[in-house]
Amino acid sequence: MSTPLQRIEEVGVVPIIRAPSPDHALRIAEALIEAEMPILEVTFTVPGAAEVIRRLRIGYPDLLVGAGTVLDGPTARAAISEGAQFLVSVTAPPNVMALGPQHGIPVIPGAYTPTEILAALAMGAQVVKLFPAELGGPGYLRALRGPLPSLRAFPTGGVSADNVGEWLAAGAVAVGVGSVLIRDAAATGDYEGLRRRARELMEAVRAARGTGR
């Protein structure tokens, strides 16, 4: 059985859910699941995020569910207690970096500069979230991997079906996709558009990797 990090690398894309309410978050999650996305990240900017994670774990046992925007120990504990299978942060909070492995839960910390990346790796990170990725683009990741060829980067920010191939070619092991994918689905109720974008994104990843369906 694949570990959570192996599964993320196998699939290649993690949709990031931000929504104004638990109900909206669950509806977005359902649309993504209907589009055959097997991994979801629920950020702790969502009201009641821990409850959303719990309900997804119960309702979809085959789904890999992670918690995002995990900035401190109490948030990490809440996510883990409700079944989060991986944790993602925008930085590398020491208490989160320590707590995840204590419970067998991988942590993907956020970093951008070489100094931040090396600090995250020194704390045990196996995969580093490159954020905000759109600032430097795929060229920046390619430049980073010159001196850091073993870097397993997870770019997040500005990734889309149109450029995901460039990110993968630059060395990304997987990507995180939030607002570009979700857009205003919660406000407009356009979940069919969300499903379409999700399918297009998955197809673009498969095409970039040459894996077909």
Image: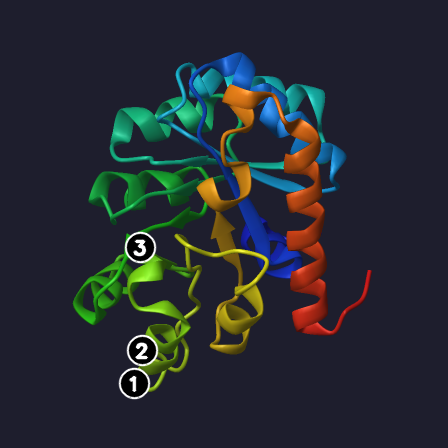
Q: Nearer the viewer, mark 2 or mark 1?
A: 2
Q: How many marks?
A: 3
Report crowding for label 3: few under 14, some 14 to 19, many 20 or more residues within 10 A (C-alpha).
Answer: some
The C terminus is located in which quarter? Answer: bottom right
Circles 2 and 1, Cβ within 8 Å, touching? The answer is yes
Question: Residue tagged by mark 2?
Answer: 144
Q: Secondary structure at mark 3?
A: loop
Q: Residue furthest left?
A: 115
Q: Quadrant of residue 205?
A: bottom right
Q: What residue type is disc 2 on?
A: Leu
Q: Secondary structure at mark 2?
A: helix
Q: CA distance from mark 1 to mark 3?
A: 20 Å
Q: Is residue 38 above or below residue 54?
A: below
Q: Residue sitting at 68 percent across and 72 percent down?
A: 209
User: 161 or 78, which is in the foreground?
Assistant: 161
Q: Nearer the viewer, mark 2 or mark 3?
A: 3
User: 117 or 192, which is in the foreground?
Assistant: 192
x and y percentages locating residue 143 in the rendered image: 32, 82
x and y percentages locating residue 74 in the rendered image: 28, 24
Question: Residue tagged by mark 3?
Answer: 132
Q: Secondary structure at mark 1?
A: loop
User: 49 or 160, which is in the foreground?
Assistant: 160
Q: Residue sitting at 57 percent across and 62 percent down?
A: 162
Report crowding for label 2: few under 14, some 14 to 19, many 20 or more residues within 10 A (C-alpha).
Answer: some
Q: Is residue 63 above or below residue 79?
A: below
Render colour scheme: rainbow
Question: Residue tagged by mark 1?
Answer: 147
- The answer to whether 147 appears left or right of 150 in the picture is left
x and y percentages locating residue 157 in the rendered image: 39, 52
Q: Residue furthest bottom?
A: 146
Q: CA distance from mark 2 to mark 1?
A: 6 Å
**Residue 81 seen by the camera:** yes
